[in-house]
Amino acid sequence: MKNNNIEQRDNFGSRFGIIAAAAGSAIGLGNIWKFPYMTGLNGGAAFIIVYLVCIAFIGLTLMLSEFIIGRRAQKNAIGAFKKLAPNTPWFLTGWMGVIAAFVILSFYGVIAGWCMEYIVRAVMNSFAGMSPDEITSSFVDFIGRGGKPIFWQVAFMSLTGFIVVSGIKDGIEKYAKILMPLLVAIIIILDIRAITLPGAGAGLEFLFKPDFSKLTANGILMALGHAFFSLSLGMGTMITYGSYISKKENLGETALQVTIADTLIALLAGIAIFPAVFAFGIEPNAGPGLVFITLPNVFQQMPLGYLFSILFFILLTVAALTSSISILEVVVAYFVEDLKMNRKRATITATLAITLLGIPCSLSQGAVPLNIGGMSFLDAMSWLTDNLLLPLGGLLIVAFVGWVLGRKEVEEEVTAGGIKVSYIPLFMFLAKFVAPIAIALVFLNGVGII
Ligand code: PHE
């Protein structure tokens, strides 16, 4: 039975559904496209260690903070601050989140569109017989075109809107429960293939044997910014999803499980990629082109590469989709609850507006010279979220929980339903001091103030 009463909020229906949806949000292009290429650019294992430290101390604290805010308020990212801290400027934190959602999804949709094009290319076996130069130029040529990447971007955004329009239980949760197991299965198959290649050891060494001389200050900033991006933090996604978690659920445990799942998948993606890259004597530092240029080269030389290339690009697209729906939901939840739109109208409006903002991102890859501060428009949007919006949002969110909400409310929320926890003193210490200071330092360093 459809319930059109806006007073009654839709909720996740099951434990597995919550984990699938939240882990689905976290696990995305960030894990499979960006984490491997950043690791490649920053020298491997040492970068991974810094990343893991950021995840453990800051990421996890922030994830739980967002869940607490969302579930306590039972509201979207902006409404939550209005409810928990009425008549204060804290709601601006929520605003920043909604803006970040717009910005992120605009370029995310473009890159996810590239992944869809690459499923088609993989199926058509188009990489076969191409020289490395040809593979590079066919990628550069494709993203630099006007029409085709936009066609795929629109296709991907339509899929995203199609899922979100059906709501939480019948849309987001339903698809996450199907897509996430598929993703795990594909990545395990790809991992087995990669580590059984002759010469795979060099890639594993690159991933797990640290050389700290390769680590730079900028690398540390990238690791923190990426921790936020990868865990979907700092912009209200987990506030929004937290608001759909029932009061019976254990928030601390959920945050821990989602964080571990996200980190494992990033590592598994590294294991699927680098052993193969090294086994075929290719340089690991290709940057954003790693999965679109380096990997097709690898697949071409690999036994059964045809099959694995199809699986890989399906994996990327599936991962992107379970993330993009969570980003769109941040905006849609706000439109529905605070602007009182119905869900269909909210979804269509948000999807259209974000897709439009994505078009300059797409065009900036070659079709039209759209540059900001020496970066393409797409890179500038990505830089803006990683280095400004997410760290600043994360800082405000964690400080809000530590200082404004305070220990009593935190305790009430994480122990709701009679759950016993022992981490509250540690959590409060992290939320009040460690996380805000660490984020502030890295952030000021990143924008060049210290
Ligand atoms: N976490 C997603 C990924 O790794 C991206 C994302 C960022 C999703 C911010 C939601 C919010 O691809």
Image: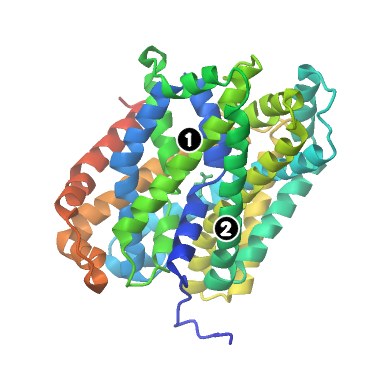
Reading the image, the residue beneath label 1 is 267
> Which quarter of the figure is the N terminus placed in?
bottom right
Residue placed under numbered mark 2 in the picture:
325
Task: Compare marks 2 and 1 and give the one earlier in the sequence.
Answer: 1
Q: Amino acid at mark 2?
A: Ile
Q: Quadrant of the image for the C terminus?
A: top left
Q: Position of residue 130 (x, y in %)?
A: 83, 22
Disc 1 residue: CB within 8 Å of ligand 1 = no
Tag 1 secondary structure: helix
Q: Nearer the viewer, residue 336 or 232?
A: 232
Q: Is residue 283 visible?
A: yes
Residue 194's label in the rendered image is none
Name which residue lies at 22% across and 72% down. Answer: 418
Q: Position of residue 220 (x, y in %)?
A: 37, 26
Residue 106 vertical position relative to residue 325 in the rendered view, above or below: above
Q: Secondary structure at mark 2?
A: helix
**Residue 198 rendering spot, x and y as whole percentages:** 62, 19
Q: Position of residue 415 (x, y in %)?
A: 22, 66
Q: Nearer the viewer, residue 360 or 422?
A: 422
As drawn, is 411 to the left or to the right of 67? left
Amino acid under disc 1: Leu
